[in-house]
Amino acid sequence: MSHTPRTRTVLSCSLLVVALCVGGTACGETDDHPLSAKPYDAARQIVFSGPSGNQKADPDKPLEVTSKGGEGRITDVTATDAVGRYVAGELSADGTRWHTTVPLAAAAHYTLRVSAEDKEGAPGNKVITFDTGTPKEKNTLEVGFGPDEGTYGVGQPVIAELSEPVKDKASRRIVERGLKVESKPVVEGSWYWVDDQTLHYRPKEYWPADAKVTARSNLKGIKIADRLWGDETKPLNLTIGDRIVAVTDAAAHVMTVYRNGEEINEIPVTTGKPGYETRNGVKVILGKEYFVRMRGTSIGIASGSSDSYDLPVYWATRVTWSGEYVHAAPWSVGSQGAANVSHGCTGMSTGNAAWFFETVKEGDLVQVINSNGEDMDAFGNGYGDWNLDWGDWEEGSSILGKPSERRPPAAQIARLRPQV
């Protein structure tokens, strides 16, 4: 008996629903726009400022989509080119106008998808396609990625060389947004503008061992500056090998070599003597040369002076463009592990130099500590990128950077500790 009133209530509601549905209007629908229907064609509601027929849009001019007064409003617009690049735009608060906020690419095919609603709130859509033309007067910006494809150490930066200088801040932001570096596993990283035509990319920490790194450009057809447009660029693929870090303690006269955090060798060495002290800091291995003829004149020592030298050198691993190497120095074996007698290079026995030469690769790291020498330059004499901490590195980005005084190199080096 206690359930009877509830049963009557349910039946009454059911009859009420049936009555409403029978009364001329289907449940959940209106005569004009059934909810189950597809969005209506909003062509009569939408006005497009772009070309019609076979005409091509001027990539220099912004595009605009508007809704006719009193016909409803625009709710969303997406614009993409044939390779999937999105075009940034802005929709007015009242939904009557959308316009592009960045230049279009030249010689590209675009698709605009416009979503709208009429005065009753029913959804509509419109798809618009068009092509852009090529500016009559233009220069192209080519990008060359480096190094060559291959396997490198965890300290190797990605280099982007531009064919034209880019000085304007807004143009730099366009370039930087178009240059993409991706890695597996994913790591945090950023570009740094070394000068108007050179950018370096490095992660916050060293690359993970065995990572796969790809650099590519999305600048093709993109306007960068007045009469300057991006050109097609060949992508770059790199493989990162084991994490090899060699830490040279100039005061203790010893180099300790680590692979993936494990010590694999300890080598007695000699570094730069007074007046020729080896540079402190982190250096990226630039290359390996089995034989090099080293002359004092190459570093400013006059021929015939007491410091002059002219020597055949074997198993030479280069760490700066100015001629600092890790190499075999059989003439100084008696001082290795005990005193610093070189002109700035790190010398070791022939056997140890051959082992080091065969163990390391480009992109591996040599870090010198406890030397009385100058600090390694961040740029200009090899790849000293790692001598900037992450905050300083971000300031070199046109997107992330904030104007501030840079800390002096000595302060940067003082904060560094061996990372093995």
Image (cartoon, grey):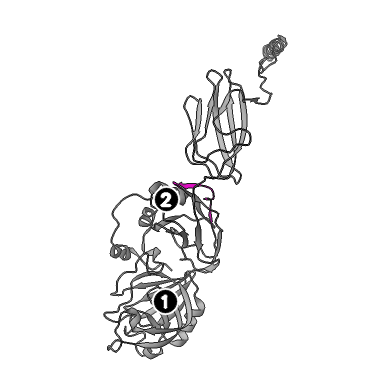
Residue 147 is situated, as x and y percent measured from the top left of the image, at 50, 66
- Which element carries disc 1, helix, strand or loop? strand
Vertical side of 403 occupied by 34: above or below: above
Image quadrant containing the N terminus: top right
What is the tally of numbered marks visible in this picture?
A: 2
Splitting the image into 4 quarters, where does residue 113 fall?
top right
Label 2: how many residues lie within 10 Å, few (<14), some (14-19) or many (20+)?
A: many
Residue 187 is situated, as x and y percent measured from the top left of the image, at 49, 56
Choose mark 2 or mark 1, whichever is in front: 2
Residue 9 is situated, as x and y percent measured from the top left of the image, at 67, 12
Q: Nearer the viewer, residue 189 or 247?
A: 189
Q: Nearer the viewer, residue 8 or 46?
A: 46
313 in magenta: no
Residue 263 visible, this angle: no
Vertical side of 74 occupied by 328: above or below: below
Q: Residue furthest front?
A: 136
Tell me where the magenta segment starts and ends, as one range: 216-226
Residue 275 is situated, as x and y percent measured from the top left of the image, at 26, 79
Q: Residue at x 38, y 57 (%)?
A: 393
Residue on which the image places disc 1: 256
Q: Does label 2 or label 1 sit earlier along the sequence?
A: 2
Label 1: how many residues lie within 10 Å, few (<14), some (14-19) or many (20+)?
A: some
Residue kind at label 2, given as amino acid type: Arg
Residue kind at label 1, given as amino acid type: Thr
Splitting the image into 4 quarters, where does residue 406 fall?
bottom left
Is residue 156 found left or right of 277 in the rendered image?
Answer: right
Q: CA distance from mark 2 to mark 1?
A: 41 Å
Residue on which the image places disc 2: 172
Residue 153 visible, this angle: yes
Image quadrant containing the C terminus: bottom left
